[in-house]
Amino acid sequence: MNRNTLNLFSILSLILLTQFVQPLEAKQDRPNIVWVVSEDNSANWYRLYNPENGAAMPNIEKLAEHGLVFNDAYSCAPVCSAARSTIISGCYGPRLGSHFHRNQGPVTMPKGLKMFPAYLREAGYYTSNCHKEDYNFNKDEKIGVWDESSKRASYRKRAEGQPFFHVQNYHRTHESQMFKGLPEGRTPVVKKSEVQLFPYHPDTELFREKYAQYVTLNTIVDEEIGRLIKQLEDDGLMDDTFIFHYGDHGGVLPGGKGYAHNDGLQVAMVVYVPENWKHLAPAAAGSRVDGMVEFVDLSATVLNLAGVDVPEQMDGKPFLGKGVTTESLKKDDVAFGYADRFDEKYDLVRFLRKGKYTYWRSYQPFNYDGLFNEYRYKQPAFREWRDMAWSGKLNEVQGAFYEPRQPEQLYDLESDPHETNNLANDPKFASVLKEMRKEVQKRVKCMNDLSFIPESEFLKNSSGDGEAYGNENSSRISDLVDIADWQLLSFKKVKGKLKSALEMDDPYKRYWALINCSAFGKEAAIFLPKAKELAKNDPSLLVRTRAVEFIGLVEGTEGLAPQVMDILSKSTDPVEVNLILNTVVLLMDGAGLELQKAEIEKSQWSKMEGKVVPRRVEYLLSKAK
């Protein structure tokens, strides 16, 4: 064979080889993953989940036709920073201290664990986020997480052929959009006369207008999502790209966002499954999938789809990818949620969904849901609801938001989707209640739930490492959970225990004993003399605060103002001051406490900087004499 013949043979061989090999190279060795996230958007607002009253969202519905709809998907927290911190870490917030909205001090990821997109980058993925983060972690935790996180971030900036993980956030359904009307030029897509109100909302023109507005905002977001899908189609990426759509938590009408209720936690979860990767889906395209899916699972799911090992420190587990089946998903019949501090407002509620039942554990049940929060009450509908409650214009179901809660609440979602008929006191459901109670007790103890120690104490003594601090204080937290759960017994059974706890050396055992006294109310009046002693002399300012709270709720607030002002004057920690002010607002709005404007204005604590204390100060001044 001469040289020319050999060259011709080589060229022909190369052409043939290219023809056969090129199609194999065109298929990626790993899928792309895109998240399209709308804000403050519960499953109730989608026609996919609520056929009669949800918004028609054709672009998301098209994704569903070519993918999966998860029937029971849950944010772990009902507010953005706590929910997004759960997603990015793959860890339940209360074990890290990342569940307070927003962090008032440094909070770190567990040692050795990175925010999950960092593992994708290490595996060769391009990671981009456009553009919201809102994580309750130190800024340096984000190093190495995103190739770009900005308003201009795009998967299109990756290297040729590089797989990518891209997050696109949509703001149009955010709560702030409800402070005003629809965007200029838009009209409601439904008549306000045709909307069906949740049973806990008053039937007013304003509420109907806001319902129609929110349905319309969802259709606008769907249009925006449609433009991104069209871009992916134009780029020829649909056969290799998983597209997730979900709301970043529930909401947004009053009583949704910010509250560990089903309307605040259940979200849509729709996943488009690309043709080249349908073997990684547990069901055929167009299927609806049963089994609980939680936000804590999202990171593990993406890593599993990308073929990256899920770190053992993560709490979540995959709901797509290798090893996942419809049967394994059905076995996951529990979702866990948590609400604590939302900006300046404190509460402590844990939520459990198991099967068709939901369970709320309110550890401070006298802290009624509607307690003032500056951001909440920017919504005109929220203000109207409050004014109607204070004027006695609501029925029992509508007015419950402004009344103390029961420590335990149990609901059947099949018959009562908006959780208005509490079954906790019905003997027929005693076994269900007991099962749900035990599950929550187990979870808060096993994760060393940091809310059982006041936030100011945690931040002062932990250097922000919540996991390590929780492990060091595991036994203490378990004891505090046990004391808190005395609320669930009869006062007769726990009277002796409360008496002993009020004398204990650990200030937070005294603290929780006093919270229990407030929960029992007038039944616990026998402890008022002890509470008055603690209110004046206890070395812990927070114990003094809880003692004043108990006195004010049970006996009245006359004469308590000097003690309140004295407690506040002795604190130099704004985190502690904010917690004290939560009690002050509760006593002002719920028990008639009167403060003097001049006394507030000359106090040192009223000059504290930051966001939360100034908000409380502004409200107190608006109410003071």
Image (cartoon, helix red, strand yellow):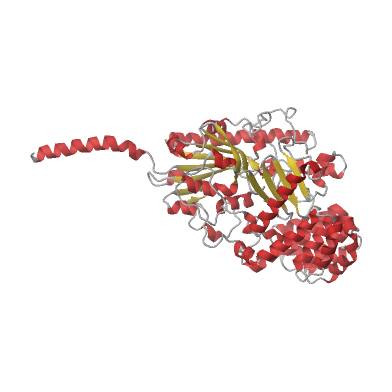
611 up-or-down from 59: above or below: below
Relative image position of residue 77 (x, y in whole percent): 65, 49
Residue at position x 74%, y 50% from top? 361
Q: Is residue 71 visible?
A: yes
Residue at position x 45%, y 52% from top? 121
How many numbered marks appear? 0
Give whichever of 453, 441 is nearer the camera. Answer: 441
Relative image position of residue 146 (x, y in whole percent): 49, 52
Relative image position of residue 254 (x, y in whole percent): 74, 42
Residue at position x 88%, y 42% from top? 392
Report which quarter residue 553 is drawn in: bottom right
Q: Is residue 179 visible?
A: no
568 up-or-down from 338: above or below: below
Give whichever of 421, 149 is nearer the camera. Answer: 421
Quadrant of the frame with the C terminus: bottom right
Give whichever of 78, 311 is nearer the camera. Answer: 311
Report which quarter residue 246 is drawn in: top right
Quadrant of the frame with the N terminus: top left
Relative image position of residue 459 (x, y in whole percent): 66, 65
